[in-house]
Amino acid sequence: MNSIHRLLKFILPEKAFTAVRDGTREWLIECQCGHTRDLWDAGGVRYKAAGEPRRYLTCPKCGEERWHTIRKKTDTTTK
């Protein structure tokens, strides 16, 4: 668990922390090369949010610095 997650766990009641964690797990980060990963596992937090923001990150698969889209998981998403 990264520092942001530990801070949230410390300041939020257990029920609220669980809601934030579960809400964030509905989102993923997608690279232009097609690699996707869970936002929570990548250290992010996104709760009660909308839209598809983009972040300039290094992809762990291709190693390139590229724009990654943060989007909500769909029914067809396996991760």
Image (spheres, helix red, strand yellow):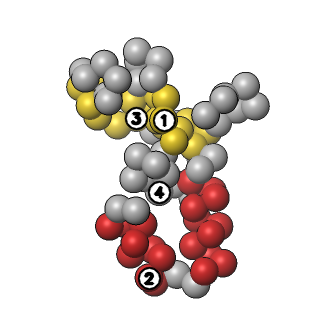
Kind of residue at disc 1: Arg
Image spot of residue 10 (x, y percent): 44, 82
Residue that badge 3 annotates? 54
Callout 2: helix, strand or loop? helix
> Could you tell me which residue is drawn at 41 percent across and 24 percent down?
31
**Looking at the rendered structure, which numbered label has been put on residue 13?**
none
Callout 3: helix, strand or loop? strand
Callout 4: helix, strand or loop? loop
Q: Give the left or right position of residue 19, taking residue 28 as reference.
A: right
Kind of residue at disc 3: Arg
Image spot of residue 75 (x, y percent): 76, 31
Question: On screen, 24 above or below 68?
Answer: below
Residue that badge 1 annotates? 37
Q: Nearer the viewer, mark 3 or mark 1?
A: 1
> Could you tell me which residue is drawn at 58 percent across and 65 percent down?
20
Residue that badge 2 annotates? 10
**N-terminal label among 2 and 4:** 2
Q: Residues within 10 Å of mark 3 (few under 14, many from 20)?
A: some
| Spatial separation of the CA atoms under disc 4 and disc 1 | 13 Å
Residue that badge 4 annotates? 45
Toward the right, the furthest residue is 75
